[in-house]
């Protein structure tokens, strides 16, 4: 499907805001539930696309630098994502993720990927799970899949049967004519609700608080125990979209912090500073900053509350 809308493209700016070297000591343990890693050639291609069509990426790191940077600044645990841009890439990317996670035992949760509709999608995911990957990451804007397409059934069934969570960028924004498909046709809260109904044991996270359908996603997490949201880039006053829903008004056991690092145009800790300045209840902070992610991704909590290194 080719997206031919001829609207004028608006490239968003870098902010050049100051950054600190450490997570503030008065914040609890932090799981960053939305971090991107890729082999170098793919990372470079992604940055070229962002430079032209989205925003200038501030942190142009390799995968190991990404993880090291966050951990060295006091982030306690990282959830790492990739997504396959075309059929035939997933096995290679999943093996790459496995090797990366092995360098950080107990500190990085790696997610698998697959290209929806490619041959043997279920086998690809089963193999990734057998290697120790903890779930699946998909991106409808890039992979151009319809949330309710028949080709998605195999992925949903495989994840549900294995008890593995699924992170899907299936919110409608950010929309861009640079994509090869129109996300408003492929995505939406109503489409996601059909998946929640049809696969009642499948845990799903929608990133960015479901931008731009903030209110519909607020209602969905209240209605379904299998749906989570992450905060990536939605609490930073960056996108020209008004969010009428306060963080404290959301079902707080279903929202988790994520940075979208390193593909951001501002300081790595901008969102953490916003959360810290919010004057939130300590129970809310613990839930958003680590406990909800630990529940969703199955991060080991056997020793109780983790300590920041």
Image (tube, helix red, strand yellow):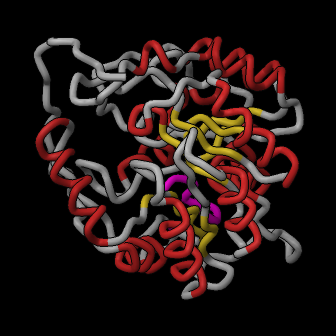
Residue 124 sits inside the magenta stretch? no
What residue is drawn where x is 42% and y is 21%? 183
Front residue of this view, candidates 284 and 54: 54
Residue 34 sits inside the magenta stretch? yes
**What number of labels is visible?**
0
Front residue of this view, candidates 270 and 231: 231
What residue is drawn where x is 21% and y is 62%? 44
The location of residue 15, given as percent across then percent down, is 17, 44
What residue is drawn where x is 60% and y is 85%? 102
Front residue of this view, candidates 217 and 202: 202
Q: Is residue 279 visible?
A: no
Q: Quadrant of residue 141?
A: top left
Q: Is residue 68 visible?
A: yes
The location of residue 308, given as percent across then percent down, is 61, 76
Q: Is residue 254 left or right of residue 76?
A: right
The location of residue 282, given as percent across then percent down, is 70, 48
The location of residue 149, given as percent across then percent down, is 62, 23
Image quadrant in which the C terminus is located: bottom right
Front residue of this view, candidates 186 and 260: 186
Image quadrant in which the N terminus is located: top left
Q: Quadrant of residue 68?
A: bottom left
Report the span colored magenta: 25-35
């Amino acid at each position: 499907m080719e997206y031919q809308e001829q609207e004028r493209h608006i490239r968003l700016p870098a902010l050049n805001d100051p950054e600190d070297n450490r997570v503030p000591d008065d914040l609890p343990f932090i799981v960053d539930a939305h971090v991107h890693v890729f082999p170098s050639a793919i990372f470079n291609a992604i940055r070229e696309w962002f430079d032209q069509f989205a925003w200038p990426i501030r942190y142009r790191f390799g995968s190991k630098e990404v993880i090291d940077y966050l951990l060295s600044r006091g982030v306690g645990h990282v959830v790492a994502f990739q997504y396959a841009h075309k059929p035939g890439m997933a096995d290679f990317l999943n093996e790459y993720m496995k090797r990366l996670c092995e360098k950080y035992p107990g500190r990085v949760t790696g997610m698998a990927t697959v290209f929806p509709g490619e041959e043997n999608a279920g086998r690809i995911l089963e193999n990734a799970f057998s290697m120790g990957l903890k779930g699946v990451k998909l991106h409808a804007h890039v992979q151009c899949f319809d949330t309710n397409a028949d080709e998605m059934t195999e992925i949903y069934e495989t994840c549900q049967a294995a008890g593995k969570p699924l992170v899907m960028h299936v919110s409608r924004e950010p929309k861009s004519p640079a994509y090869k498909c129109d996300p408003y046709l492929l995505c939406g809260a109503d489409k996601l609700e059909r998946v929640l109904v049809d696969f009642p044991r499948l845990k799903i996270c929608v990133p960015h608080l479901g931008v731009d359908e903030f209110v519909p996603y607020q209602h969905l997490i209240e209605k379904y125990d299998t749906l989570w949201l992450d905060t990536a880039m939605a609490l930073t006053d960056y996108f020209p979209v008004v969010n009428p829903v306060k963080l404290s008004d959301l079902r707080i056991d279903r929202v988790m912090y994520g940075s979208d690092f390193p593909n951001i145009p501002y300081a790595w800790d901008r969102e953490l500073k916003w959360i810290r300045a919010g004057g939130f209840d300590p129970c809310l902070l613990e839930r958003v900053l680590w406990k909800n992610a630990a529940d969703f991704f199955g991060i080991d909590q056997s020793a109780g509350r983790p300590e920041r290194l």
